[in-house]
Amino acid sequence: MPELRKDPIAGRWVIISIERGKRPTDFGMRVSAKKGGFCAFCSGNEHTTPPEILAIRPDKSAPNTPGWTLRVVSNKFPALQIEGQLNRVGEGIFDKMNGVGAHEVIIESPDHNLTLSTMPLKSIEDALQAFYYRISELKKDRRFKYVLVFKNEGDAAGASLEHTHTQLIALPIVPKLVQEEINNARQYYNYKERCIFCDIIRQEIADKIRVISENENYISLAPFAPRSPFETWILPKTHESRFAPDGQFPLLAQILQQTLRQIDSVVNLPPYNMMIHISPFRDEVNEYYHWHIEIKPKLTKIAGFEWGSGFYINPTPPEEAARFMREAKI
Amino acid sequence: MPELRKDPIAGRWVIISIERGKRPTDFGMRVSAKKGGFCAFCSGNEHTTPPEILAIRPDKSAPNTPGWTLRVVSNKFPALQIEGQLNRVGEGIFDKMNGVGAHEVIIESPDHNLTLSTMPLKSIEDALQAFYYRISELKKDRRFKYVLVFKNEGDAAGASLEHTHTQLIALPIVPKLVQEEINNARQYYNYKERCIFCDIIRQEIADKIRVISENENYISLAPFAPRSPFETWILPKTHESRFAPDGQFPLLAQILQQTLRQIDSVVNLPPYNMMIHISPFRDEVNEYYHWHIEIKPKLTKIAGFEWGSGFYINPTPPEEAARFMREAKI
């Protein structure tokens, strides 16, 4: 019998269609081999991107020249524009505002062929630190209420360039999905006086069936109601509402790379999306919301049922996914 | 400057990135040519589907034999299962229930090569009537709170069979996206004492820029904040909360086929999803919610930004999409 499960944080239901349970090898998609050719994110082509906002240059080389190990640049084709005022206005019954925001690209490595799974751990540490630094800087701009950090790996997951990179978008509004998580977490907190994420982590550690791995500070787990097969969350084990892992970057980089290697090993290098959910700037230090990373391999299609209902159909129970990932040889 | 627009019914924001405005011909995807081969939905293969629940047989032929012009059967690989009780239970902090529901397939034509754009109008009328009839029947089952009717056309839109068909899923809960629309519509009604959809229709008819076409009873329009290029809604022009277009099937079939032909002509036969949003059974006749059809061509990819935020980035302003569709030669 299929099962309907509710994610208590997002407030959405998913259908775990156990009968159709797919083995990891049943999923056809994988990131296609890199084609190469000209790449704006490769070393030597720094002049073809917008000027760098931040870079790590161990050899003290000049900005916008080779020698970097990590670069942050503005997106050349930004979804939102950095200049201007918001001008919230109505248009009859409708509401709109100027598309003001920042859209940046974090290039974690000058090497075209590396990914988060294969690059040196130090590159991931640096990238996490760059996310933290850029979020802190963008927070100073009072027009922005939120920064979403996300990664699209592979064409099917929406990556338009094959050289791996992460993006961030600073937004003048708190995104709907984050606001929903906050509303649900706050409702739980009002009732229980405990963080719902902390309670979930406690239950998962006791149950052991959906935990994938742990280190001193972080845990990775298959959420109870995942939207798609092998969806994985990484969370700090103790309460942290704000993304500020000072001193913890090595441990976070370690569990992130390990998780991606487990997914790559079990599902054969799938395209994936990664999103970091943090507390909005306005109430950044709070007791009800817990920052976390969501990794969502792109293994199923979103069709009319999902578009019309907001339900997701997932053919792989998270208990099975977690077991496969725990047993993965990486 | 890109624009942020809010859909007042769904409560979600979209980014209309006008600078990157794509012409209709810029979209690469199209429904690939049909490959043919064995098809369970073709005339002559009735024994390979579950037995028919409903069929139109002008020649009075026997059930589950050729001679039909429309067939409704259970889905052979249902997402939910018809037998059993809901058994809502907790699992520690989490909530789950049995995956009880109905999952049916409406085959609008025995001809493998027709689509809603190309089949005789009478077939579409019959299909709409079949939706209405099956919703009315499933409503009698007190376990169900909602029926979602949807169509996936083309592989990229999630269709697993190329012979066109519509599906319906009866659900023991009101889907999240429908509940959000209802909450927002009710909030508006509480404030204004008018249906928000009726107000939108009045404004669109006055503005004329996003209206695509109209007939005596129905209107098709590009919504103010569409999730993707050429998203189109079809609504009854006067208030109707319940999907019961008795006597209006020909007019509804006409505008539906015309809209799909306009999309096919402008974007070159794109894959698409179609969803019908109706009032939940519990409060089916009401003054605040207005049933409607949403048609969403599959022309953009859902990536990390969308998964993490619930925002959508749409490169085609609805005003342009509506103009292209109005001018389409069909």
Image: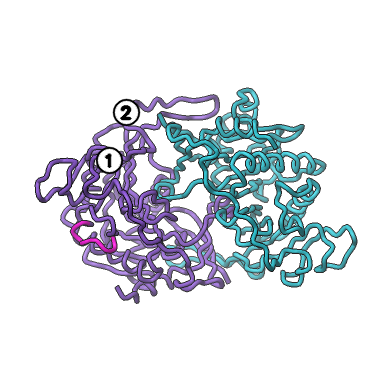
Chain colours: A cyan, B purple
Quadrant for the C terminus of chain B, please.
bottom left
Numbered circle sitting on residue B83? 2
Classify residue B72 by image quadrant: top left
Residues in magenta, as a range: B116-123
Q: Chain of mark 1?
A: B
Residue A83 seen in render: yes
Above or below for A147 versus B23: above
Q: CA distance from mark 1 to mark 2?
A: 19 Å
Element carrying mark 1: loop
Q: Secondary structure at mark 2?
A: loop
From the viewer's perspective, is the residue at label 1 or at label 2 nearer? Answer: 1
Q: Residue A134 bears which disc, if any?
A: none
- Viewer-proximal residue among B81 and A175: B81
Q: Is residue A91 magenta?
A: no
Q: Chain of mark 2?
A: B
Q: Residue at x 62, y 29 (%)?
A: A199
Left of A228 or right of it: where is B138? left
Position in image of residue A319 (x %, y %): 56, 30
